[in-house]
Image (tube, helix red, strand yellow):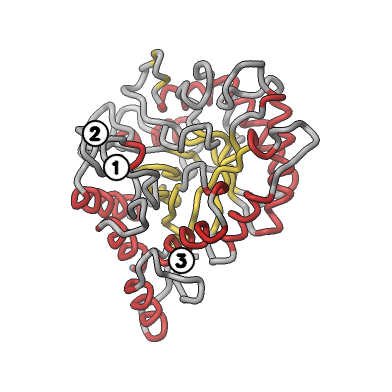
Amino acid sequence: MLHLRPQFVAAASSRGGFAAAIVALCLAASPASAGVQHSSLQNARFGFAAGGNLHNLAPAELDRYLDGVRAAHAGWVRVDVNWSVIQYRGRDTYNWEPFDRVVNGITSRGMHVLAGILYTPPWARPPGTPATTPPTSLADYAAFARVVAGRYAPLGVHAYEIWNEPNIPDFWSPRPDPARYTQLLRLAYAAVKSVDPSATVLSGGLSPHGFFGQVDEGGMNPLTFLERMYAAGARGSFDALAWHPFNFPWGLGFARWSAWSQLTRTTPSARSVLRAHGDGAKKIWATEFGFPTGNTSREVSEAKQARLLEKSLHDLVGRSWAGPAFVYSYRDSGTNDRDVLDNFGVVRYDYSPKPAYRVFQRVAAAPH
């Protein structure tokens, strides 16, 4: 739902002694001025979902971006490993350089990479269809996933998310198909594990879409999609469930249609569906969620963004079933305060921090 548009297509340690001095230094640093020379304590419970354009940033800008993420004590960055870009020119050609820069930039700063393997190059999909169309041959996607894991495991990448929001047509064109997605997931899981048996393979993060049972032209409810994945044989083909619990601008209050409530509080819920299929021990990773600031009815004030972010991070870190939580996003993608997609950042487009940046930094620096 909230990746950039397709065309752009270590736990916290003790706060005593020397560690406390490091934390104080990082808290004082602004995201724009923080440099790699500063020590930092990265929290493996928290990260940022970067969206789809990190590989397009010039080297100096990428450094600035990742230095600010690191100074926030984030332990993870979720990035796109975009098949449609890497193999755009054909089955036997690869354009790794911009993606290698991103991966090396993250890991060299002591952070983990969650690599989303997604989108289809023109040669692998029907003519005239968008990159969000699944491949004609699912084996082509699996072959690419195997190559990705073989390339990046030696660089320290051991977590992969298989596609993005396959329950809505924006990212699985022309319409969601849980049975076909499950085929893709099963093939990709086996491919990644064949070269990196210790890797954590996540199902594609599911988008909010109304009430349980809702299926319409806008997509399929994530609980419904998950149930149908299991019916198609998904058990045993993912190590953790990825979920996108967006609920802006309303916050964390209960509602049957809320993807946040559907984590645990509705009937059924993501947790109850996992348990019903023998997967109750699996973690749920919130791989994308956030609260946009701006000037429309769907956006919130910067102060409210900070409050909602603090509540949601504390809520997730207190849940035994919750995996790492990825805030969408670190930086605003534009400056139009009436465009929701421009304003999810905890820092503004010019890298000046919103109050939410300091909240993230403070929560991530605290021991958990």
Q: Amino acid at mark 3?
A: Gln
Mark 1 crowdedness (10 Å alpha carbons): few <14, some 14-19, many ≥20: many
Q: Is residue 34 left or right of residue 291?
A: right
Say which residue appears at 29% left-offset and 62% top-offset.
358
Q: Quadrant of residue 131?
A: top right
Mark 3 crowdedness (10 Å alpha carbons): few <14, some 14-19, many ≥20: many
Q: Is residue 93 left or right of residue 58?
A: right
From mark 1 to mark 2, how far is it between C-alphas?
8 Å
From mark 1 to mark 3, how far is it between C-alphas?
25 Å
Say which residue appears at 59% left-offset and 45% top-offset.
160
Q: Amino acid at mark 1?
A: Pro
Between discs 1 and 2, the one toward the N terminus: 1
Which residue in the protein does label 3 denote?
42
Residue 251 location in percent, x, y? 23, 41
Which residue in the protein does label 2 denote?
298
Q: Quadrant of residue 355?
A: bottom left
